[in-house]
Image (spheres, helix red, strand yellow):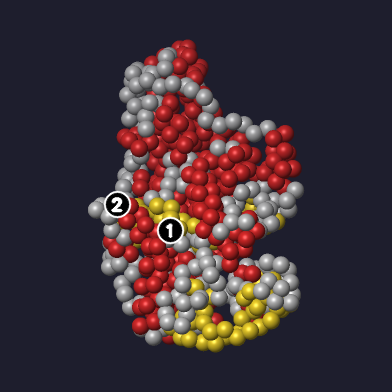
Amino acid sequence: MSKILITSALPYINGVPHLGHMVGCLLPSDVYARFMRMMGHEVLYIAGTDEHGTTSEVGALKEGLSVEEYCDKYYNQHKATYKAFNLSFDCFGRTSSEQNKEITYHIFEQLDKNGYIEERTIKQVYSVDDKRFLADRYITGTCPHCGYDKARGDQCENCTKVLEPTELINPRSTISGSTNLEVRETKHLFLNLPKIEKDLSEWVAQKEPYWPDVAYSIAQKWLKEGLQERCITRDLKWGFPVNKPGYEDKVFYVWFDAPIGYIGITKQWADEKPEERSWQKWWLNADDVRYVEFMGKDNVPFHAIFFPAMLLGTKEKWTFVDYLKGMSYLTFEGGKFSKSEQRGVFADKAIEEFPADYWRYWLMANAPEASDSSFTFDGFVGTVNKDLNGVLGNFVSRVLKMTASKIGAEVPAGGEMTSVENELIANLQEKTDNYLRYMENMEFRKALAELRAIWVEGNNYISVTEPWTVIKENPERAAAILRVCINLIRIFGILSAPIMPTVAQDMLGKLGLSIDAHSGLKGFNIADEIGYLKPGHKFEVGEPLFERITPERCEELKAKYGSKK
């Protein structure tokens, strides 16, 4: 058993993430966490809301709330949505916590002590009409590198280059739209990344055989272009006040304390049961921990470059990410998802339309791993109807209904295994081994293709053996076939559990079983599992696992959400 630390990009507090965010970091991290638990590992799965910065200040102002009230409101909304989406965090915390403040201060003090912090007087954009300095994300303009006309002051999401607000062409305030902007002088603190660059380059170079191309190529691109000093303070009120004389009226930049939030949230988790838990055993001198991060490609620079550089600069033995699963983008009906423009399907609305597992399956089967993928309602409905309802759901219903009506609501006795079953076992073992390997390697689309192929094997088996015909002349043989099929339901439930936990429990529940008691995947042997349920074991037919989505409902969904393109 190994210790596996899992984190995903921390969603920003302003509103609930859309499906693109879900598949870009949160859902894959949950699937992997569930899988690794089922493989027998000790897993700590950490997530939370990213709460500091101007976005919270402006959002609170618009809603007539204090910033604390605003963050409380959306933290609870995030937490409820993720619970409904069946995300299995060990702790869902907040970057605004006292624990994160404590660790942020410690890391800053170490960086300052080791000579990596510099004081500079810089020019910063001030909005005369808004009467405030504008944080990077509240300045919009044209990217000087690629010409994208909606680039933010901290990064162009089109070409992913990190920017300084003063570099933007034709800048404007995102808050008011005002172009009445001035550049004024203000004093700030910088992290001297060039002084850490050599050590960081050596660390990143070790990741080449392991990291996916999306993450490794972005990290190398940054290093080849050369790192620049990075400002880590802001002229704001909402954030951690800087713990350095002369800077008490400033706060740390949200991108400084946000990744430290992983450690702070772990400390929140540990502080709940200090007699049982230690955050240090996961983050400091923790040689036995494997650390895996999940995030969209726009967040990769901050986690492959800035956060590791911060930790390296402390000269302390922190836990560094071993594998960074960078994800590409999910598009919506030919355009972009947008939280700010409320375009696309958002996680809280998605679960009002269909059960979470419908979305979980589609998103993981179409995960944007090596390249972007596209969400369409036609594709979603087609997958639910064909894969879930037609392949998996139909198999479960056919088997249980047929057995109950022809023999009774229990695993039938009689008959022997034949060469047909031996061939089935061999085919299933090969596909199961592939599925487990792909899941271990976080190749989710390949894993989901194998999972579907496993379900198809069950359908092929029942079609070839035709128990509904055989039972008329050879009841013993039909009993053996149906006994195998009922055991396949259990196998399908266990294998599906990381992807569709509720559906998996429904399948096992029909057999009077619990996923928690039957969740081991390590060394999963089909020859043993195919005979797990013995004759006489009771089952119930129950309700269908899935409902077919009609063409009319599909058109309704397109009209409801597609009009936001």
Q: Which residue is mark 2?
A: 273
Q: Residue at x 56, y 32 (%)?
A: 546
Q: Residue at x 47, y 80 (%)?
A: 247
Q: Amino acid at mark 1?
A: Thr
Q: Residue at x 46, y 72 (%)?
A: 241
* Crowd around label 1: few <14 · some 14–19 · many ≥20 (10 Å): many
Q: Is residue 533 visible?
A: yes
- Residue 403 x, y percent position in the rendering: 45, 18
Above or below for 561 versus 406: below
Q: Which residue is mark 1?
A: 7
Q: Residue furthest left?
A: 275
Q: CA distance from mark 2 to mark 1?
A: 20 Å
Above or below for 320 versus 89: below
Left or right: where does residue 286 sit relative to residue 122?
left
* Crowd around label 2: few <14 · some 14–19 · many ≥20 (10 Å): few
Q: Residue at x 66, y 51 (%)?
A: 344
Q: Amino acid at mark 2?
A: Lys
Q: Are marks 2 and 1 in contact (CB under 8 Å)?
A: no
Query: Can you tell which mark lies on residue 532?
Result: none
- Residue 57 x, y percent position in the rendering: 58, 64
Left or right: where does residue 554 sit relative to residue 529?
right
